[in-house]
Amino acid sequence: MRLTTRAPWRRALVNWGGAAALGLSIALPATAEDAPAVGLPFEEQVQVCGACHGNDGNSQQAGTPSLAGQPELTIVNQMIYFRERLRQNEVMTPQARGLPDAEIQALAAYYHEQPVAAPEGGPDPELKARGQQLAAQQRCASCHQSDYRGREQMPRLAGQREDYLIAAMIAYRDRTRGGPDTTMIDVMRGIDDDDIDAMAHFFTYLHAEE
Amino acid sequence: MPMLKHPLASAIALTLGAGLALGLATSAIADDHEPAWAQGRSSDMADSPLAPHATPLTVTAVEDIPIDHIRLPDGFSAEIWAHGMPGARMMARGDDGTLFIGTRGIGRVYAVLDNDDGEDREHVIIAEGLTQPNGVAFKDGSLYVAAINRIFRYDDIESHLANGDVPEPEELTDAFGLPDDEHHGWKFLAFGPDGRLYVPVGAPCNGCDVDEDTHATIHSFEPDGSDMRVEARGVRNSVGFDFHPETDELWFTNNAQDWLGEHGPQDTLNRLVESGDHYGFPFCHGHGIADPERGDQGSCNDIVMPAAMLGAHSAPLGMRFYTGEMFPEEYQNAMFIARRGSWNRTLSVGYDIQVAHISDDGERAAISPFIVGLLDPRENDFAGRPVDVLQMPDGALLVADEYNGAIYRISYETPDYVEE
């Protein structure tokens, strides 16, 4: 790899892909655009993520998803959508900018291994039963697995925060959540708020004692 | 959203809208609550595990690239020519030797710099944040990029790259006026021998009625987007074509409808006989099979039959004629066809490069394997997905592997046992 004689690339648009592929490090300063976690050791990166998502990946913050137990590819793909600005989110798009593939993959592997904590409170049995019925009608399990633990790019739903699941499903339905994978936009078309509430409740309290 | 102070900020801002607009651009044709790829799936197949294979968005380490899986006819060999470009799809070569590469999901356009000094080639990302910028074409110093549904032209791209920057693109989206459907909305791009830019527009569905002048077509335009012509109709989804080196005829691959059966209808190789001809979609498929829903007895009467069958669900994409001097004589004016590989059948096919030899009357072609080994039929699993081919000036053939973000170089040396 030659790095000597070339003019400096405008890094905001143009990244040195070849170097990343070889695992070489190029001594370029992090630009103002890069995420706060860029260049930090892994333990400190986990603290950056953990400030919102919880240190063990179980989020205690309203509207912020838990990462614990998520399939690795789910986290990797969403982080890359944020990084590449294919998915716009006020918080996460800046947090992902400039993070190399390998660091995203390491974080994803860490959160995948974290145990999923029990949700706060208990289920409303009636709402949960209705949610179960709706999820079966919608065939959610055909991608998210029969126990809703997710698979590859398809996220874990079991035990996820209820407020986050509601917000995510509404965002897909209302087409305010971008990203290259449009599967959920099609799946959620025309589903009403009450049904979304019931499905979210079912997924959150899937393994909870009734 | 971060403040953008960069001189190319406007170019970035141009692309920012793409992800947001994506939902609005989605056509409402899909069955209620079914994702686009499942449209047309019968109720008795509702629990089928068949679904498209996700393309990795991350770099494949060079030691994991399956170059050793590749099998070729005697005398041919394969090497890794460039790598580290997740989602690498369609290729176009600049006059000064830069290789431009489009992608789909990751939204980038790559440029591999022509600086071979025996070490790894460098590449740069020249555009990002676009919605499926699959199509790339090069003419008169300019790179053309086709995303959904936007067309960009980067003038003097190679001299800019030599100076270490990327020119601000000219956006030609309004001039081309292409539909904004996400489904089959990704474009192949190529200039014809007539100097026009050829642009396919896929059907916005698996199977549906379409306006035969706007969808399931191959259009051509003047390079500025003016003077649109419909060159071919009833083409469900072509993602690869080239022009015969002697007759200038347009030959193209076409992806047939899913969920009609494990073994059919077949994907096809086609020849454009007369501008405006009809190739059957949505009422006639493959080699003359009436659609069970939209077709009837006469549905296949007035359509052009394929020049060759390429296997059901095999996903033939990029294809080019070979005119180089490196390969043996039998490859002259033959076509190399990249088959990305199937998802909508339980026994996988494709994941290879086929070679097509044209019949003496110039109307049909015979298909034969050229690169195999990326599909393991015993495990019914695959290690790579070829999506495009490109002939180099020395006659070597480049192959883009989307799954591994790598470009392979295929070269030929006469085997020892052949008398020259």
Image (spheres, rainbow, N blue to C red):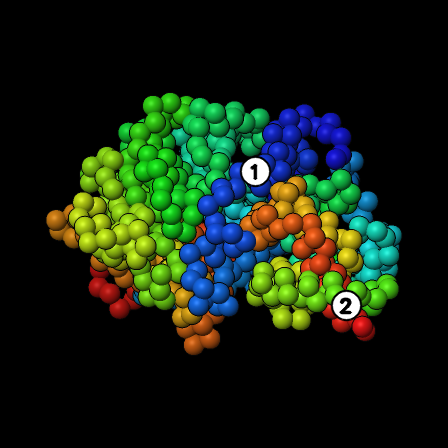
> CB atoms at circles 2 and 1 under 8 Å apart?
no
Find residue B274 and report its horizontal and vertical position in percent.
Answer: 20, 37
> Residue at left 48%, top 36%?
B180
Give the class, few, some or many, for how many residues have Cα within 10 Å of label 2's Cα (few <14, many ≥20).
some
Q: Can residue B359 be seen in this view?
A: yes
Whole-Å distance between the Cαs marked 2 and 1?
A: 37 Å
Q: Write down the residue under mark 1.
A: B24
In this figure, what is the number of numbered marks? Answer: 2
Find residue A74 and report its horizontal and vertical position in percent.
Answer: 66, 58
- The image shows residue B30, relative to residue B343, as above or below, that is above
| Amino acid tagged 2 | Pro
Q: Pinpoint the chain carrying mark 2.
A: A
What secondary structure is found at the residue carrying circle 1? helix
Give the foreground label among 2 and 1. 2
Looking at the picture, tell me which residue is in the foreground, B351 or A125. Answer: A125
| Amino acid tagged 1 | Leu
Q: Can residue B358 be seen in this view?
A: no
Outermost residue on the front side: it is A126
What secondary structure is found at the residue carrying circle 2? helix
Find residue B288 and report its horizontal and vertical position in percent.
Answer: 22, 55
The answer to whether marks 2 and 1 sit on the same chain is no
Residue A115 lies left or right of residue B110; in this view the side is right
Q: Write down the residue under mark 2.
A: A125
Looking at the picture, tell me which residue is in the foreground, B17 or B283. Answer: B283
Q: Indicate the quadrant where residue B122 lies.
A: top right
> Residue at left 18%, top 45%?
B302
Q: Quadrant of the N terminus of chain B?
A: top right
Give the class, few, some or many, for how many residues have Cα within 10 Å of label 1's Cα (few <14, many ≥20).
some
Q: Pinpoint the chain carrying mark 1.
A: B
Looking at the picture, tell me which residue is in the foreground, B327 or A92. Answer: A92
Find residue B32 and report its horizontal and vertical position in percent.
Answer: 51, 52
Residue A183 lies left or right of residue B230; in this view the side is right
